[in-house]
Image: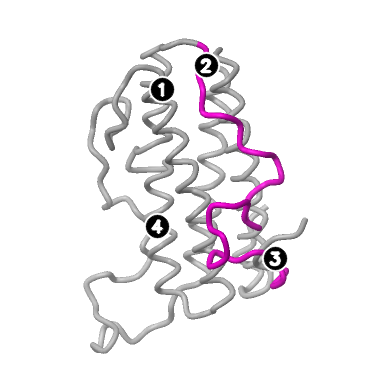
Amino acid sequence: MINCYENKNEKTVNEHPSDSLCCESSIPFPPIEVERPNTSYANLLYDAYASSGNSELQAITQYIYHHETIENERVSQALMCIAIVEMKHLDALAGLITKLGCKPAFFNSNKSWFYTGELAYIDNVNCCKNTECGKNYDHLCQKIKADILGEKAAIKNYKALLCQIGDMKVRKVIEKIISDEEVHVYIFKRILEDCCDPCYYTK
């Protein structure tokens, strides 16, 4: 598998960000279409869309934070690339929710609004870099392990959605998203192997 972490010749996030990126699967993104409006299906998608945990919105915000706070440039750029793919997922889910008959507001299926307190910051976010409490490591390994756990939880949740949604057009989008998340797990595992002690490896 070629990806933006292992191959510097692949497209980076600074080149044609709307095109296929090296941190997503080779499966083309299917059209954002539905067979017919179905608000029950739309409600099921809200958790993957904007739940405070294991959603696309949560992944985007967490990866951008990790991108900005990890000093290793290759790892930082891989995180930004992955965050952009998650933005594509967020946009796709917003389109599906709209076409299924609901509004793409940032809440979960219980209508609880998105809350950033569940992000895996890992750092003490109340410390500025130049203060005494801010003088520490960038916690690369802990952050990447948290990212792997988040991706695996997202894959599990998307597979559960496939068991609940019968609309074949929606299912094709979910299958594409799962394939991208599997690429992200692969990239994050390679980062752990390259940068971290074996105790951080995730099976």
At horizontal 46% and vertical 75% (from top left) the residue drawn is 70
Q: Residue 45 or 121: which is nearer the viewer?
A: 45
Q: Residue 153 or 90: which is nearer the viewer?
A: 90
The magenta span reads 7-35
Q: Is residue 180 left or right of residue 92?
A: right
> Mark 4 touching mark 3, by CB under 8 A?
no
At horizontal 29% and vertical 71% (from top left) the residue drawn is 124
Of mark 2 and mark 3, the one earlier in the sequence is 3
Local crowd size for mark 2, using a 10 Å CA cut-off: few (<14), some (14–19), many (≥20):
some
> Mark 1 touching mark 4, by CB under 8 A?
no
Of mark 4 and mark 3, the one earlier in the sequence is 3
**Residue to which mark 2 is pinned:** 165
Specify the farthest residue to the front: 16
> From mark 4 to mark 3, how far is it between C-alphas?
24 Å
Q: Is residue 110 left or right of residue 179?
A: left
> Mark 2 touching mark 1, by CB under 8 A?
yes
Label 1 SS: helix
Quarter holding the N terminus is bottom right
Label 2 SS: loop
Of mark 1 and mark 4, the one earlier in the sequence is 1
Q: Residue 200 or 58: which is nearer the viewer?
A: 58
Where residue 87 appears, as percent x and y from the top left, is: 45, 48
> From mark 2 to mark 1, how far is it between C-alphas?
8 Å
Of mark 1 and mark 3, the one earlier in the sequence is 3
Vertical comparison of 16 with 132: above or below: above
| Residue 44 numbered mark, or none | 1
Q: Residue 19 or 83: which is nearer the viewer?
A: 19
**Residue to which mark 3 is pinned:** 10
Question: What type is the residue that disc 4 sits on?
Answer: Gln
> From mark 4 to mark 2, how far is it between C-alphas?
28 Å
